[in-house]
Image (cartoon, rainbow, N blue to C red):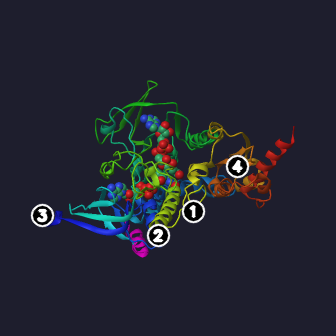
Amino acid sequence: MSESHETRTGVPYDVVVLGAGPAGANVADRARAAGLSVAVVERELVGGDCAYWACVPSKALLRPVIALADARRVDGARQAVTGRVDADGVFARRNRSVSDWDDTRQALFLKSIGADLFRGHGRLDGPRRVSVTRDDGARQILTARHAVAIATGSRPALPDIPGIAEACPWTSRQGTESSTVPTRLAIIGGGGVGIEMATLWQGLGSQVTLLARRRLIPRMEPFAGELVAQGLRESGADVRIGVQVTALRRPDPEGPVTLTLDNGGELEADEVLCATGRAPATGDIGLDTVGLTPGSWLDVDTTCLVQGVDGDWLYALGDVNHRALLTHQGKYQARTAGDAIGARAAGRPLDDTPWGDHATTADQHAVPQVFFSDPEAAAVGLSAEQAERSGYRIKTVDLDFNAAQGANLYADGYQGHARLVVDLDREVLLGVTFVGPNVSELLHSATIAVAGEIPLKRLRHAIPPFPTVSEIWLFLLATYQHDQETP
Ligand SMILES: Cc1cc2nc3c(=O)[nH]c(=O)nc-3n(C[C@H](O)[C@H](O)[C@H](O)COP(=O)(O)OP(=O)(O)OC[C@H]3O[C@@H](n4cnc5c(N)ncnc54)[C@H](O)[C@@H]3O)c2cc1C
Ligand SMILES: NC(=O)c1ccc[n+]([C@@H]2O[C@H](COP(=O)([O-])OP(=O)(O)OC[C@H]3O[C@@H](n4cnc5c(N)ncnc54)[C@H](O)[C@@H]3O)[C@@H](O)[C@H]2O)c1
């Protein structure tokens, strides 16, 4: 074996973290705060997909598109907006937001907390051991006295459509890193990636066609997808719902791509973007060496311990456990698991009862999510359908936002809709959904109400300031009270 392929064995740590995305960095931080030594293994960029190819660049790209649309909704401002979005300016903003895909600052964060960074591909090598293979082939073994935390995230899942390889489709990677605006962009999939990509590329000047098998953003209330589809159509996008792509053709790699549709039609585009979900990044991380199935999502308990592995040492956080594929939930899991690792290492008892210090209870009851489309769609907790399926006795309260004067002052003819899902037995909120301009900033109030299980009688005393978009709370709660009092 050559010098560069030498295997150095047994560098000992308390905790080894696989993957330095938001989940990995946060578990490292909490484990260090508990006084444990920590190694973090990263094969690409410290910061993960979120920082370079997902949340951060997509929101940096979307913000100018939505800022312009917001200005056009206000008489007086509208007249001052005469041009289109400047794509080069938007790309420059995106490049700054991802530090030109340079992770120096994020790596310095790991250094500042006292974690050691190992660059290379990490794999489990039996219980409590991780091998790291560098790009030059050198291999090193790290051992973990207390815990290994898998935070390797997810990757785009491509659909099994004939011609997919020849078509060289974009995924969210190209959708967030491209600095070229395709003249015609076809997007397959109507989930979060599909609607955000449609909003931003239509805003940047592409002619977008969004193809969805079912309704848009189907995990939210049905009205959310309907209003987002309406907004996309008003911006000029072609939104087709109930359509399947059955084949793709791109005979000339430099030429256009043709999509065959199940309704017999064809569609030609310059690029096609697959926004068809995610697969776990667990195919090549040595799961078989600890008795787990490579390529599977990792099932975890409330402290994020992986199920089916003996000895309380293997944790999985973030996308890889498939609980909620969101940065803020991954970070929450990582903080909770980091504290649990610290407690177990010190022999302290855990509080893993619901809402305890070492329980990720919010993953089950109060996951907030915002889609930064135009209008924005924001929801926390259960939709009415999910609540009914879970056996709750519920009442829904629905209102258009124009009930609130604050909304009408925020935007002329503010269009949006809100829904409360009330648990009638306890009179607390199970879920809240808002759709409309800038509702993203309303959502945390709803998350506090849902996670805090605040009785509606008390919530009535939380007065929204006049005249803000938040006034919608006043009208929603008054409507509920009126309906309860009216026989
Ligand atoms: C287009 C898009 C937009 C999104 N927008 C939002 C949003 O606005 N808000 C939100 O909350 N969520 C958003 N998400 C979801 C969010 O990006 C993920 O939930 C989040 O990135 C998950 O964090 P993570 O730490 O689990 O994984 P990641 O961020 O994927 O990080 C995993 C890290 O592990 C590394 N790694 C993988 N395998 C190995 C290995 N074997 N060895 C060493 N390192 C390895 C990877 O290189 C990567 O750096 C978006 C997703 C997409 C695709
Ligand atoms: N702002 C945000 O919070 C945000 C934004 C984007 C993505 N995300 C997260 O990233 C994850 C991935 O997003 P996503 O939109 O890729 O996945 P998704 O699972 O949310 O949506 C994928 C959609 O593609 C459809 N689909 C799958 N195969 C298809 C096929 N062959 N043909 C047509 N449609 C097909 C599915 O029915 C589904 O509606 C999600 O879990 C989401 O929560 C979050």
Residue at (49% x, 30% y) in the render: 243
Identity of the residue furthest to the top in this view = 264
Label 4 or label 2, whichever comes before in sequence order: 2
**SS class of the residue under badge 1?**
loop
**SS class of the residue under badge 2?**
helix
Q: Quadrant of residue 252?
A: top left
Dot 1 amino acid type: Asp
Q: Is residue 193 visible?
A: no
* Magenta-span inclusion, residue 106: yes
Which x, y percent locates residue 140? 25, 64
State if disc 2 and disc 3 touch (CB < 8 Å). Answer: no
**Residue 429: numbered disc:** 4
Give whichever of 23, 270 is nearer the camera.
23
Q: Give the range drawn in magenta.
A: 102-114
Label 4 or label 1, whichever comes before in sequence order: 1
Q: Can residue 256 be seen in this view?
A: yes
Label 3 or label 2, whichever comes before in sequence order: 3
Tell me the quarter of the image containing the N terminus.
Answer: bottom left
Position of 267 relative to 405 (above/below):
above
**Residue 60: numbered disc:** none
For disc 1, the marked residue is 357
